[in-house]
Image: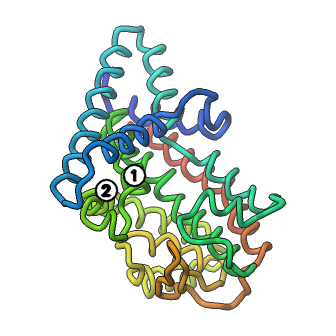
Amino acid sequence: MRFNLPEVFELAAIAYLIDCFFGEFPTKHPVVWMGQFISSFERYFYQDRVFVGALLVISLISLTLVISLGLVYLGNLFPETISLVLMAVFASTGLAMNMLHASVTNILTAENPKNALSLLVSRDTTTMTETDLYKAAVETWAENLSDGVIAPLFYLLLFGLPGIAVYKAINTMDSMIAYKTPHYLNFGKTAAIVDDIANYIPARLTALLIVLLAQDKQLAWQCVRRDGYKSESPNAGYPIAAMAGALGVSLGGDARYHGLIKYKSVLGIAINPVNKAVLEQALAMKPNINRVILTMLITALLIT
């Protein structure tokens, strides 16, 4: 498509609407292809070295950029309206509001909520208490609002289809190899650093969005300022702290990963218990989040 500012906002709005109404298409998702590339690279070339992990990062980003630029080039061969729709469909695969909300909501209705949660988090779920379960679900919802919605939308607005595609490649590598385990400590270090850089601004924008939608905006903002930086990740703590303040609960705290207890800071203020009702309240923010995002995109489109 012909790149100019109004079309970027139009592209983002259409892509977001496609994700909201249709969610994931019944085809092989681009992230699955990225995951297969990462797994194959690891299987054939893994070494416990930062350099080898950096080669993976460079390889996947380069390949993703070439493919996405190729799709843009092919799209430009069609009439402008068709090109816009095609690019929006491709871009919508990088947005995950529909899938994220459905996945976390499934915890509320699943016969075995711990199993449902285990599909979404890397922490051990088998020994979780009910409070731990709902706390992890709320944290997943808050953190992935940044990773799955705001960040990809941010890079789509900045760089079009190649921007959102490269971001998804970075985020996929982070979710697969950026762990501080003996196996991944060096191999995944570059992926972790690049992901931290990519999510720095989007995580804080997500926190601001949650504060904007909170009933007690002052408390939510207070938690962001006081606790956002306390997470081991330079980014994850901000949306989680904002959500904790918006719900009047404490999140974070120690959790078990790969059989080991990980000591984590507590975020928020424990005014309310973390239970099923709190998770429902967090998930109920979705319509307002959609409304704010679409209003901002359409307004930007109208004034450009």
In the depicted structure, whether residue 231 falls above or below residue 33: below
Q: Where does residue 163 sit, x and y in percent of width and height?
A: 33, 40
Examine the image and state in which quarter residue 253 appears.
bottom right
Q: How is the image coloured?
A: rainbow
Q: Where does residue 261 sit, x and y in percent of width and height?
A: 50, 84
**Relative side of 244 to 50, left or right:** right
Query: Badge 1 local density, few (<14 within 10 Å), some, or many (20+)?
Result: many
Which comes sooner in the sequence, label 1 or label 2?
A: 1
Q: Where does residue 215 sit, x and y in percent of width and height?
A: 66, 75
- Which of the pair 192/142 is nearer the observer? 192
Q: Where does residue 18 sit, x and y in percent of width and height?
A: 60, 33
**Relative side of 275 to 201, left or right:** right
Residue shown at 40%/45% (left/top)?
Answer: 168
Reading the image, the residue beneath label 2 is 198
Residue type, mark 1 in image: Asn
Asked if disc 1 and disc 2 are in contact, CB closer than 8 Å, the reply is yes
Residue shown at 29%/67% (left/top)?
Answer: 185
Residue shown at 29%/56% (left/top)?
Answer: 191
Reading the image, the residue beneath label 1 is 171
Helix, strand or loop under label 2:
helix
In the depicted structure, whether residue 3 falls above or below residue 193: above
- Which of the pair 130/20 is nearer the observer? 130
Residue type, mark 2 in image: Ala
Q: Quadrant of the C terminus?
A: top left
Mark 1 to mark 2 CA distance (whole Å): 9 Å
> What mark, if any, has residue 49 been given in the picture?
none
